[in-house]
Image (cartoon, rainbow, N blue to C red):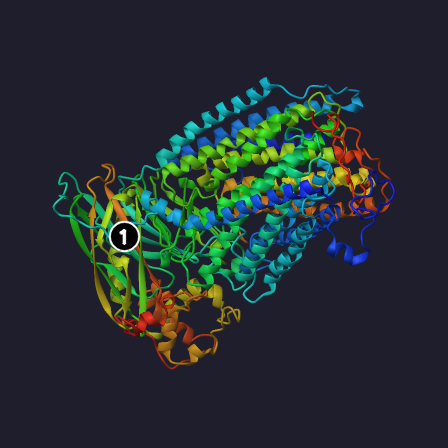
């Protein structure tokens, strides 16, 4: 019967899935000891299920073929058997116990959190990740946001999609290989979840709550995951990208970032030219503002207001700066003062006031922003 | 359609079932304090509990080991205050009373009220982390531009399991000005 | 729909009523207290809701046909996934099973009607209003619910659109309807069985509905509590789930899933009952292991209360909690397996024919079991970290709900169609509907296992390129499946209008008191309790 063939076909697919580790078919073994253990456990359970399924469905299949009225088969009269009931209660129980033991072992291994070599705080925002590096004394050394880098053009089908469509960011998380990295995971607003399939780890990012996760990656490379807890409009657009570096490379990069951090601090007192502000402003706008206010500044009224000739653009610069810093609580307009430094804020405000036909007289420098935020 | 005997049986059944419905509704609401109680007893939600009375006479530091305690400060839901700790982390002996200062600054031009919410990992350490004084026990009212220093005093219990070598304590600062209403901002 | 029957009544007049048929016109349907009419109302309502939820599914699958955003924006997409779930769970599956209960429970226990006929009417009529409110939220400013059918806080409280208050109201109404319906069902089963029908002689469908009804009255109040706490957080400044006020978003998940897990068993236990009637009928063999089947259903119901946090394995529970819930969840496989083995043993050495109800029933056993296997995989906590919130979960629950619960409902409709309408549907058309559905459902949902394993998260309107192929296949399957349900509508209407008249015992192997009644069943049946023979009910 076609039905039997479809079922058999489905089972064969499952079987081949077990053998092939093609991208599209199966879980991947990944690049950590934990992910490998998880993969092995997954394959074990899968095979157990396949074997039991094939066995039971074969019995049914046989019955459907042979125990038919049209073949003249007469129905038997039996309708109970305590022995059978006991058998097919006890045997599955034993199988389950057999599965529970390795499952428990892998879970216990995953919960072994101590002895880390470094710690990174991972913070979920609507709709991006923030990574904060902590040194040995747990001081913040530097932090950055990791935003989706795929363009709106690609998403809206106006240009061809790149290879890492929806899985690329402007600033990936970088960690060293072969060191135990601990992640402290939380969220700024709603519940998100941080997942890197190749590491075999996933944890919810809950606002107000800290969660702990760790990994030791054995192979350098770039690994991609996604947010896995519905968090609003752009839940599908906040990927997780981790670049795992050789230890020496990582140490060099880390030192450079620490140095850059002081450069960033210095920039806050710099005076930029109009062109410099426009260039940086356009970049910041594209990353943080364009998905709501649109690349052409026209927004999607009434939910995402237009910035072309709008009251804030035409009105006093300081009101505009405050709006961007403080946002509008209860709406999608976030308090970007918590996410952008004074140089970025100045650039994006300046950019908005001088784009799309907006032509304000003023210029916005980082120190203007700093003054306004009361430092 | 039903006999009289059936009628009264039905009524009895319905009464019992309505009681079950009411009991389960009550249970649902009881889940809230039960959940809090369960979390308090087990420390499973990372909350570190209320003020702790410290008696120096009975507690002395366990000098055989040091525990790293790391502080993470964040503002949530777009809260615009600056919030930082004087140190990212400290090393303490279990049983030793330690003080760390935290700072908040209201960078806006209006009076605001903030509330810090703690969360601690690993979960096995929550029961042993005692705070004798913490800004998270109260709300903080700040005038425009005001900056405040908030000491936090804590002691890590000596019974902390030996395999816990570091503790992470995060504070998430929320804006509760609206929730507090006018009285809070005009009053003291 | 039941016809007006005056002739063929097997009972005397009762009380001081003389026999009257139903009212005429709209008044009949608004004011009926007749369990057959109310069953019909529930069934047609659930089918309408199924089509509405189905359109939402097709919007989802259309957007997911290719990578990129082509048809809807992400905000609207989130409303579609949310409402598709809410409508299918609360508007299609649950009311359909209540409709089956209304039609079958009184007839199968030999009672004249439900215990509380007027409350029965109210239970139904609340639903169109509840769903009118729920669907109207899509047209409100800010849009409808967009936080998933599981509506976690704070996305569903602090960050919710204004329509959330109407959503909460609609949930309260549906809950009230379910609770009242369940009280009615329990009161009927416990107090109105014909003499001689002891508990262990009750048909399996009665057993599964008795247990399901207890689950409903236990957990619907908890759902009501959860949405009321949400309401307070949103409007009255409380902090049940709001971290700022000392509340806990994770507590929402505990409370919700304490309701939510028994809820999914509520959606499958009656299905088990239906299958336990159909397979013996078409195998011409008594159900194997009646006692075990009853104990299995009771164990599943009991276990359903202590597994809820397996929906929350990634939330940050400590090790002991994870292990507890992993073990209890795995345990559910045992009674469920017992049932599958018993159905197989019923078929074994039977004398089977494969009319449409039997095709759907056999497909149920095979495909529900596949869903059960993916459920067992999900139960294994360390691997669940890779499956959680991916399309692997979506594949799992669609297998147990669509070729699971839905197929059992369709099977029930075909099986009892002659009893309800007095006519046989067209067997060739029925079989065609079956094959289209079977093929459509597998093309739609089987590839989703792979997408999930490959790493595709759920509730996303757009996806990375490596998921494109299986998404395209799945979308094609969805349209096949969707249109085959419109074909189902045709088969039903065609049968009602021009099916051949049916016998009382429309299926040779069918057993049960309802098969002793004429087809269609009289408007008022069993006004005098029937004799319960071992032959007719389970001996």
Residue at 40% over, 58% down:
C239
Residue found at the far left of this picture: B57
Number of callouts? 1
Residue at 59% over, 37% down:
C211
Residue A157 appears in the rendering: no
Picture coordinates of residue C476, whole percent (x, y): 66, 46
Is B77 positioned to the left or the right of B125 in the image? right
Residue at 18% over, 47% down:
B91
Q: Nearer the viewer, residue C440 or B154?
A: B154
Picture coordinates of residue A7, whole percent (x, y): 64, 32
Query: Which residue is under mark 1?
Result: B50
Residue A323 appears in the rendering: yes
Q: Nearer the viewer, residue C37 or C49?
A: C37
Q: Quadrant of the C terminus of chain C?
A: top right
A333 over C86 or under it: above or below: below
Circle 1 packing at 10 Å, graded few (<14), some (14-19), many (20+), is: some
**Chain of the residue that carries numbered disc 1 in the rendered image:** B
Residue found at the far top of this picture: A83
Q: Secondary structure at mark 1?
A: loop
Q: Nearer the viewer, residue B52 or B159?
A: B52
Picture coordinates of residue C527, whole percent (x, y): 77, 40
Picture coordinates of residue C81, whole percent (x, y): 57, 53
C222 over A53 or under it: above or below: below
Q: Nearer the viewer, residue C473 or C114?
A: C114
A321 over C23 or under it: above or below: below
């Amino acid at each position: 019967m076609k039905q039997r063939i479809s079922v058999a076909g489905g089972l064969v697919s499952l079987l081949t899935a077990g053998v092939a580790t093609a991208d599209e078919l199966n879980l991947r073994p990944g690049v950590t000891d934990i992910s490998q253990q998880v993969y092995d456990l997954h394959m074990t359970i899968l095979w157990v299920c396949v074997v039991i399924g094939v066995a039971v469905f074969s019995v049914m299949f046989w019955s459907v073929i042979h125990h038919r009225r049209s073949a003249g088969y007469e129905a038997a009269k039996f309708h109970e058997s305590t022995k059978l009931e006991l058998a097919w209660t006890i045997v599955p129980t034993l199988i389950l116990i057999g599965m529970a033991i390795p499952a428990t072992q892998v879970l216990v291994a995953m919960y072994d959190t101590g002895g880390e070599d470094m710690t990174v705080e991972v913070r979920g925002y609507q709709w991006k990740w923030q990574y904060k590096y902590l040194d040995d004394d747990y001081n913040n050394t530097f932090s950055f946001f990791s935003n989706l880098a795929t363009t709106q053009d690609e998403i809206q089908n106006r240009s061809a999609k790149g290879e890492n469509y929806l899985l690329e960011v402007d600033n990936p998380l970088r960690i060293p290989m072969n060191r135990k990295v601990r992640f402290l995971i939380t969220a700024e607003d709603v519940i998100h979840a941080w997942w890197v399939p190749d590491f075999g780890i996933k944890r919810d990012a809950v606002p107000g709550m800290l969660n702990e996760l760790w990994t030791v990656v054995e192979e350098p490379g770039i690994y991609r995951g996604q947010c896995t807890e519905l968090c609003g409009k752009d839940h599908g657009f906040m990927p997780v990208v981790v670049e795992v570096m050789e230890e020496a490379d990582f140490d060099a990069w880390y030192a450079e970032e620490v140095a850059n951090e002081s450069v960033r601090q210095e920039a806050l007192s710099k005076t930029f030219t109009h062109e410099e502000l426009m260039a940086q402003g356009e970049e910041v706008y594209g990353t943080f503002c364009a998905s709501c206010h649109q690349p052409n500044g026209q927004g999607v009224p009434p939910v995402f207001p237009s910035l072309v000739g709008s009251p804030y653009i035409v009105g006093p610069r300081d009101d505009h700066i405050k709006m961007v810093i403080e946002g509008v609580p209860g709406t999608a307009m976030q308090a970007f003062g918590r996410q952008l430094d004074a140089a970025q804020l100045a650039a994006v405000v300046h950019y908005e006031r001088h784009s799309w036909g907006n032509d304000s007289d003023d210029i916005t420098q980082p120190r203007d922003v700093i003054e306004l935020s009361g430092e | 359609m039903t006999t009289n005997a059936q009628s009264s049986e039905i009524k009895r059944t319905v009464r019992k079932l309505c009681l079950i419905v009411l009991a389960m509704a009550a249970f649902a609401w009881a889940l809230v304090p039960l959940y809090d109680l369960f979390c308090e007893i087990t420390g499973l939600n990372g909350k570190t509990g209320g003020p702790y009375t410290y008696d120096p006479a009975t507690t002395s530091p366990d000098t055989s080991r040091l525990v790293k305690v790391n502080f993470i400060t964040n503002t949530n839901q777009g809260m615009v205050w600056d919030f930082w700790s004087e140190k990212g982390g400290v090393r303490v002996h279990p049983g030793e009373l330690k003080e760390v200062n935290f700072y908040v600054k209201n960078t806006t031009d209006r009076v605001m009220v903030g509330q810090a919410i703690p969360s601690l990992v690993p979960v096995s350490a929550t029961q042993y982390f005692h705070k004798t004084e913490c800004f998270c026990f109260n709300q903080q009212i700040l005038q425009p531009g005001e900056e405040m220093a908030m000491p936090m005093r804590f002691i890590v219990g000596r019974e902390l399991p030996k395999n816990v070598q570091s503790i992470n304590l995060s504070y998430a600062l929320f804006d509760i000005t609206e929730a507090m209403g006018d009285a809070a901002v005009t009053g003291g | 729909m039941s016809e007006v029957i005056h002739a063929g009544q097997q009972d005397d007049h009762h009380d001081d009523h003389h026999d009257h048929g139903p009212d005429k016109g709209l008044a009949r349907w608004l004011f009926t207290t007749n369990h057959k009419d109310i069953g019909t109302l529930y069934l047609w309502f659930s089918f309408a809701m199924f089509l509405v939820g189905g359109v939402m599914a097709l919007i989802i699958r259309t957007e997911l046909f290719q990578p990129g955003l082509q048809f809807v924006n992400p905000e609207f997409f989130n409303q579609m996934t949310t409402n598709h779930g809410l409508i299918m769970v609360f508007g299609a599956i649950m009311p359909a099973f209540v409709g089956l209960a209304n039609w079958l429970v009184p007839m199968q226990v030999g009672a004249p009607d439900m215990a509380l006929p007027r409350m029965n009417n109210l239970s139904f009529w609340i639903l169109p209003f509840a769903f009118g409110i729920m669907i109207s939220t899509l047209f409100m400013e800010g849009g409808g619910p967009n936080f998933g059918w599981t509506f976690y806080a704070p996305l569903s409280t602090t960050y919710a659109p204004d329509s959330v208050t109407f959503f909460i109201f609609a949930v309260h109404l549906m809950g009230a309807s379910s609770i009242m319906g369940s009280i009615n069902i329990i009161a009927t089963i416990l107090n109105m069985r014909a003499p001689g029908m002891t508990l262990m002689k009750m048909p399996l469908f009665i057993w599964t509905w008795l247990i399901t009804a207890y689950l409903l009255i236990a957990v619907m109040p908890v759902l009501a509590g959860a949405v009321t706490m949400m309401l307070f957080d949103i409007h009255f400044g409380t902090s049940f789930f709001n971290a700022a006020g000392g509340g806990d978003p994770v507590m929402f998940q505990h409370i919700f899933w304490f309701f939510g897990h028994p809820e999914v068993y509520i959606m499958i236990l009656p299905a088990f009952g239906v299958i336990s009637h159909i397979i013996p009928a078409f195998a011409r063999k008594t159900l194997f292991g009646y006692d075990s089947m009853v104990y299995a259903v009771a164990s599943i119901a009991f276990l359903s209360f202590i597994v809820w946090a397996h929906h929350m394995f990634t939330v940050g529970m400590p090790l002991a909690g994870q292990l507890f819930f992993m073990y209890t969840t795995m345990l559910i496989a045992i009674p469920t397996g017992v049932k599958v083995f018993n159905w197989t043993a019923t078929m074994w050495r039977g004398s089977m024919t494969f009319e449409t109800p039997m095709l759907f029933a056999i497909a149920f056993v095979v495909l529900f079991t596949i869903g059960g296997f993916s459920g067992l995989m999900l139960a294994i906590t360390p691997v669940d970290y890779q499956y959680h919130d991916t399309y692997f979960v979506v594949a799992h629950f669609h297998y147990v709900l669509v070729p699971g619960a839905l197929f059992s409902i369709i099977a029930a409709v075909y099986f009892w169609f002659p009893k309800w309408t007095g006519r046989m549907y067209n067997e060739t058309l029925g079989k065609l509907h079956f094959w289209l559905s079977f093929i459509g459902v597998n093309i739609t949902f089987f590839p989703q296992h792979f997408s999930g394993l490959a790493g595709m998260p759920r509730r996303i309107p757009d996806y990375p390129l490596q998921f494109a192929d299986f998404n395209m296949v799945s979308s094609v399957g969805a349209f096949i499946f969707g249109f085959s349900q419109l074909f189902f509508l045709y088969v039903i209407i065609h049968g009602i209008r021009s099916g051949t008249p049916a016998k009382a015992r429309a299926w040779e192997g069918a057993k049960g008191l309802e098969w002793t009644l004429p087809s269609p069943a009289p408007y008022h049946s069993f006004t005098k309790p029937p004799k319960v023979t071992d032959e007719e009910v389970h001996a």
